[in-house]
Image: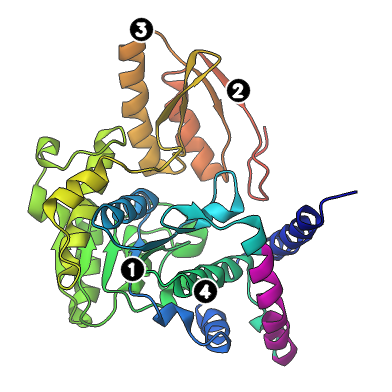
């Protein structure tokens, strides 16, 4: 006899991923309507809102680790998940369980259908369902503070119904151009859409033209800007250390450090908690070294041209470290991403094995 809970969860995930198959929906109006029907759980817990082309997941994980080290009860919302759907919504790094996802879906589905009955375009998307689950979970678990990662862009992202204590923009480069535009200035403006009046903004390392756009939008909102480059400069040796490997993670660590400083009172995160948190970050799939049958295997989620530049340096270092070229197994979503990654991998790999991710946007062989 099948497990009733497992069968129910399978039906729930079929429903949720069926929403995803309908395609992306951008704009915050639907999310605002859903939040209103739920009593605005996004207002129950203070948050830090994190956007950026690269590094936003790592910075979010670092912020969560620092806050946990300081003794705060934290919520963390990130995307996408690597293995389990519940990874997206975590409280004190405990992922949302299958039973919780099932219960939340049963709770949210009638609300979604009510909204859709009034206007078919108001039916929440997959990402909006998950965002609602995050807000409800953090409110019901009485989190002290949450870290909310933007899904895509910023201005029109479902998470942008929050009014954060601090807004963070980790980096700006070319990605998701079909949605955000093909110019750095346009992408920067979309990311800067998370800036709220009077709330401090922390920016990571980025092109000068992107920084000018963000500073201009911040000035319009009366939002003070704190810059990693202004604080730490070019020399990576001046940047905070972290247990996550590679120089770019030290850039991310600096961004997270400035973000917790910007929180101010009553949070007042001590320097010792910052250092401790940065040495205990749990964020898989970012140049992560594991052993498979005794062999070194590196898992990495580089997925755009800026990420390919970092990957190039990492692979060169790996070849120098091991004395041999690696065997690479890779797949990509979209031709622009595939081109940048494959050109980089081809410079270093002994063999390349192409796989097709189980995603609608995946490149074929």
Q: Is residue 107 magenta?
A: yes
The earlier-in-sequence mark between 4 and 3 is 4
Q: Which residue is mark 4?
A: 136
Q: Which residue is mark 1?
A: 145
Q: Which residue is mark 2?
A: 353
Q: Is residue 102 left or right of residue 133?
A: right
Residue shown at 24% from the left, 67% from the top = 213
The dominant secondary structure in magenta is helix
Q: How is the image coloured?
A: rainbow
The answer to the question of whether label 3 and label 2 lie on touching residues, with beta carbons closer than 8 A, is no
Q: Measure the C-alpha gap from mark 4 to mark 3.
A: 51 Å
- Stretch of the chain drawn in magenta: 102-118
Q: Measure the C-alpha gap from mark 3 to mark 2.
A: 21 Å
Coordinates of residue 156 in the picture (x, y in percent): 46, 73
| Label ID, residue 241 | none
Do we see residue 23 in this rendering?
A: no
């Amino acid at each position: 006899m099948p497990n009733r809970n497992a069968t129910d969860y399978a039906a729930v995930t079929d429903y949720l991923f069926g929403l995803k198959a309908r395609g992306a929906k951008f704009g915050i109006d639907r999310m605002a309507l859903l939040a209103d029907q739920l009593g605005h759980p996004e207002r129950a817990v203070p948050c830090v809102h994190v956007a950026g082309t690269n590094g936003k997941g790592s910075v979010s994980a670092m912020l969560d680790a620092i806050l946990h080290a300081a003794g705060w009860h934290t919520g963390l919302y990130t995307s996408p998940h690597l293995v389990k759907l519940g990874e997206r919504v975590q409280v004190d790094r405990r992922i949302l369980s299958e039973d919780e996802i099932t219960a939340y879906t049963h709770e949210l589905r009638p609300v979604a259908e009510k909204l859709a009955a009034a206007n078919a375009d108001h039916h929440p998307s997959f990402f909006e369902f998950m965002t609602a689950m995050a807000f409800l979970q953090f409110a019901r678990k009485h989190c002290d503070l949450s870290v909310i990662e933007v899904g895509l862009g910023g201005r029109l992202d479902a998470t942008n119904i929050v009014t954060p204590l601090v807004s963070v923009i980790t980096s700006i480069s070319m990605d998701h151009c079909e949605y955000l535009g093909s110019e750095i200035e346009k992408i920067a403006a979309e990311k800067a859409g998370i800036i709220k009046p009077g709330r401090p903004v922390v920016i990571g390392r980025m092109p000068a033209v992107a920084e000018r756009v963000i500073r201009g939008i911040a000035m319009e909102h009366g939002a003070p800007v704190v810059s990693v480059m202004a604080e730490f400069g070019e020399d990576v040796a001046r940047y905070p250390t972290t247990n996550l490997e590679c120089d770019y993670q030290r850039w991310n660590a600096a961004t997270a450090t400035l973000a917790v400083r910007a929180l101010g009172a009553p949070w007042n995160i001590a320097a010792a908690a910052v250092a401790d948190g940065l040495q205990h970050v749990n964020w898989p799939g970012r140049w992560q070294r594991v052993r498979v049958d005794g062999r070194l295997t590196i898992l990495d989620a580089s997925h755009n041209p800026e990420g390919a530049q970092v990957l190039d340096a990492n692979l060169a270092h790996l070849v120098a470290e091991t004395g041999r070229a690696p065997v690479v197994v890779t797949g990509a979503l979209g031709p622009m991403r595939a081109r940048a990654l494959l050109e980089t991998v081809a410079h270093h790999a002994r063999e390349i094995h192409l796989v097709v991710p189980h995603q609608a946007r995946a490149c074929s062989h």
